[in-house]
Amino acid sequence: MTAPHVSLTDPTHSSFLPPPDPVRSPVTGWTRAHWEALADRLLDGLLPYASRKLAQYRLPGRPGHAGSWSDGLEGYARSFLLAACRIAGSGGRVPPELIERYAAGLAAGTDPEGAERWPPIADRAQPMVEAASIAIALHETRPWIWDRLDDAVRQRVAAWLGGFVGARANDSNWRLFQVVTEEFLASVGAPHSRAEIDGGLARLEDWYRGDGWYTDGDGRKFDYYNGWALHLYPILWARIAGPRADASLTEVHRARLRAFLGTHQYFFGSDGAPVHQGRSLTYRYATAAPLWAGALADATPLPPGRTRRLASGALRHFTERGVPDERGLLSLGWYRPFLPVTQRYSGPASPYWASKAFLGLLLPAGHPVWTAPEEPGPVDTADAYLALPAPGWLLHSTAADGIVRLVNHGSDRLPPPPAEAEDSPHYAKFAYSSATAPDTPSDGPATGPDSHLALLTADGTEVSGRGRIHPLGAEGRRAASWHRAVLPGSDQGRRIETTSVVHGPWEIRVHRVEGPPGAVVREGGWALADDSGPLTEAAGPGWALARREADGLTSAVVALHGWEEPGADGPSHGTVAQVRGANAYGEYSATPCLRLTGHPGRPHLLVTLVVLSADPVRPCDPELLRARASTRVTAAGAVVVRFPDGTEEEVPAGEGSG
């Protein structure tokens, strides 16, 4: 079957790709040949930016915080990982110049007197990240590169990688860079520290939160690093270690990856788009890396045809939206170049961690993940609901429009107290999806109105953030948390407790809001974005919507309880916030909002229906939704919410109810 909104004859099909194969891949049309063609396109696109001796790739764009010297190494290391997948996956049957190119770069980069020498590995320095990619690539291509290097070059490579021994890594996924690099050194008989390898693997145990979920260091740091780092590197370490690996520990890692993939498969929309949440999103289709890791380690619950459908769907999604660009480069952005989706450490070659998506090429062409007919993903066939207690998330997806929505009541990426509770638009929102991105303005408040409930000063100039998220649980179709809203310039926080209940494309949020008398309360729905022009907007008493005309995608908010103004017959008129240049999905973005202009000064109950939908059968009519959805508060203080189709659920008193 073909998933909703996926066409096997899409006119944007890139000319460097082979024709789609609707027999073997009836959902995406993509086969191994498409992956190989895209890998070649990415590798060829880098050649004009290679240094003379091929040790660095100096790509155009904003330098990362480590500087241009490190950025050049990053270009070599991350593309070497891609080249390694291509070389090893074909048994070395690639143009010889590809092998020679990366072998020459090793010789020049590790020459301590050479003009293209790499920066040394030092405590908590960026070369630690790149060393891991080089170590993995060297292991996977050993018969074609390492074993054919001059002995003097091998010694220099080992000496450069050996800078890891005794060095201090950041206490996060970086500990695993040390693990894989030093395990490679052990595999070639070079100096290493078994205590550092074992210590890094042991530290991983401290971050495990159950059900396949790790936090990336202390705190509640849940995002894609769980899959493309914390699960991936233990699997790659085991490939390098071979018989040296502790079999019982390896089995633990495999079991956890298996559990994670049972969940991870729900993070991809029917069009292949991954849910847009967290940092380093410019790695894009690296989200497919754990899918392949599961197949490589025989640690996946997914049928092989589904593994390929999900991975190919992600790769195709970006390829059809201009990634890579006309030069064959991965830019700093999501589709188009867009710096607000990056971090300080993101340099011009940073997006090439996307190379991890190509680990599937290490599996032979006759492996079932390449030969089995594609099978639909979870979102392709039925509505789904998934509570994830470890990260404090709630997933709900709808087959009619192929959209996956993530409700966030647990991940804020903050170190434990007393660290300051700062906001990030990629962590502080109530919700993320496969069809939208949060507004990330380069100036103004760090947290825009979308998927957020805030206190504002009476003049609207100061806005509270969400900050540290305190989870209260996730189960069934419900998740809850509380946060302390602090207005800038104030040292007094106000507790806001929220329960989200989901059904179909709908989320009902039940808020218990503390606030100073007269403060404005504002809640926003999803931010929609488009490149073609301003989005359609409409608003009325107690509702607002934004709509993208090209595909009918609609974001709406509807007041169900507590939004009535003092002395008024009903809630105030909704509004739509329009901005430009602040969204990774398009130049123009719009967010429907509700406002309460005068908080009573005592705990106040607000209930809101939030909708994101492109369902052609169930059009999003806010006035009709407002007439059909409702809320009632019981004598015991529980809140009974009624969805537009009549489905009811009770939120107990004390859980977002007040």
Image (cartoon, rainbow, N blue to C red):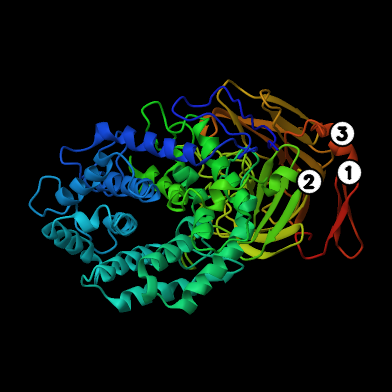
Q: Dot 3: what SS?
A: helix
Q: Dot 2: what SS?
A: loop
> What amino acid is found at the position of numbered circle 1 in the picture?
Asp
Disc 2 to disc 1, C-alpha distance: 10 Å
What's the mark number on residue 504?
2
Q: Position of residue 420 (x, y in %)?
A: 47, 60
The one nearer the camera, 36 or 552, is 36
The one nearer the camera, 302 or 275, is 302
Q: Are marks 2 and 1 in contact (CB under 8 Å)?
A: yes
Q: Position of residue 613 (x, y in %)?
A: 73, 37
Nearer the observer, disc 3 or disc 1?
1
Q: Is residue 61 visible?
A: no
Disc 2 to disc 3, C-alpha distance: 16 Å
- Nearer the N terminus, badge 2 or badge 3? 2
- Nearer the N terminus, badge 2 or badge 1? 2
Rendered view: 600 above or below 220: above
What's the mark number on residue 645?
1
- State which quarter of the image contains the C terminus: bottom right
> What amino acid is found at the position of numbered circle 2 in the picture?
Gly
What's the mark number on residue 570?
none
Residue tagged 3:
624
Asked whether, in this view, residue 144 is left or right of residue 53, the answer is: right
Disc 3 to disc 1, C-alpha distance: 11 Å
Report crowding for label 3: few under 14, some 14 to 19, many 20 or more residues within 10 A (C-alpha).
Answer: few
Rendered view: 435 above or below 77: above
Report crowding for label 1: few under 14, some 14 to 19, many 20 or more residues within 10 A (C-alpha).
Answer: few
- Nearer the N terminus, badge 3 or badge 1? 3
Q: Are marks 2 and 3 in contact (CB under 8 Å)?
A: no
